[in-house]
Amino acid sequence: MTSTATILTADYLLTMDAQNSVIPEGAVAIEDGRIVSVGTLEVVKASHPTLPVKRIDNALLMPGLINAHAHSGFLRGTAEHLPVWDWLTIHINPMHRVLLPHEAEAASYLCYAESALSGTTTVVDMWRYMDGSARAAEAIGTRLVAVPYVGEHPDYNYFDTLDMNEAMIETWHRKANGRINVWVGLEHLFYADAAGQSRAIAMAKRHNTGFHTHCSEAEVEVGGFLETYGKRPMHVLEDLGFFEAPRTMLAHAVWLDDAEIELIAKYNVSVAHNPVSNMKLASGIAPIADMLAAGIPVGLGTDGEKENNNFDMFEEMKTASLLGKLRHHDASAMDSWQCLRMATSLGAKAIGLEDEIGSLEVGKRADIIAVRTDTPRMTPLFGQGPYFNLQHNLVHAVRGGDVAMTMVDGQIIVEDGVLKTGDIKAIIADIHAMAPAHFARRAEWLAANGGGTKQWISEKASVA
Ligand SMILES: [Zn+2]
């Protein structure tokens, strides 16, 4: 893919640097996909006089959003109003039983297109048959952290395997000009036997990559850990060596006590917070303000299309703010800057890419979005002075549909709200064409198998 050397400018530039700098009539110069100058248009033009200037009218520029935990999929709106374990048994795991590689690839096209259109430039996607996901990310031009959904256990042999995960690393890690990273994934610690657990850690170390899993999402899981290991989940993960991977990111971490927060803060462990999913599946309210106070890098994620039900990171920022305020009965908790950081600079740290993305600073990759300022949702807008409200509008008012332009690695992939790197109508048509057959196969499987998959929690539910 080609990216052109240019200067990009708009009404305001929100850098998300350590000072939360906002530059009226700000600009960035971009060469070879990297930011080479940041400042007022005047200063940037003086430093790079030969570069053409592209002005996006009625917009502000800011770093592309980082979705720290998502799943490609096509079950949107078909698995509603169920608690997490019923939802897994009746809908999600049977989907995995009958999922085909071409269906998984179509789902990734849909996910990455929707993400790009709503201002997300990096997606951490835990999904299946991820060769197709990597092809989708390469074509659409998004940045991807691919995390195969691995089950390495006889009861969960319908997920990807660690062999498939390792092949994915060997084929795709740091490919597409470095836009694609591949981590080691486990759906859940209980989806791997002891040998699988230690092999997963060893694999992340050997390839110097990250490890990602779901943990402490539902309260009942804590009971499962206590019964199986005699300890709460974070202590078990420590004992098993999961915190020795170069980077471990835990999705959810809703049910952590104070000692567990203190413990993970000592390691290279980050958390992906998914407030919409946690509310929708009635999982609970994660103690995010406490984690942030302990110095844990917390990113923000939408989770999947079936538990959110969209990939709009602006909606996720707002929900993180509201849920944090509710948890602490404190209207000042989870302020707008904090929510913006979780979706940009701190999210980048949570996925170990803080040197590359997350802010508009010299040396970083040019992952930049333009958000419209001429909408009712952005009115009134004060980008400087005593009534400054730009950060509050972004978190509490703006929606993903207000994104005018999305650039990744210096390449514009969305312009004037239109996907430039794929045919959105064809991407949607592909899903409509294949979903009915998939649902029919799933219904057949369910009818032949007693209406659900075996789930560890069904045997241990009494501990809740
Ligand atoms: Zn998830």
Image (cartoon, helix red, strand yellow):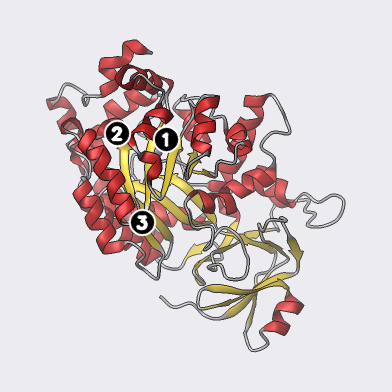
The residue wearing badge 3 is 208
Q: Give me the C-alpha separation between circle 3 and circle 1.
A: 31 Å
Q: Give me the C-alpha separation between circle 1 and circle 2.
A: 10 Å
The residue wearing badge 2 is 92
> Do we see residue 397 in this rendering?
no
Residue 5, compared with residue 246, is above or below; it is: below
Name which residue lies at 50% across and 78% down: 32
Name which residue lies at 34% across and 60% down: 136
Closer-to-camera residue (109/225): 225
Tell me if label 2 and label 3 are in contact, CB under 8 Å.
no
Sequence-wise first label, 1 or 2: 2
The yes-or-no answer for disc 1 within 8 Å of ligand 1 is yes
Closer-to-camera residue (266/431): 266
Q: Give me the C-alpha separation between circle 2 and circle 3.
A: 31 Å
Q: Position of residue 271 (x, y in %)?
A: 49, 40
Residue 307: give its label: 1
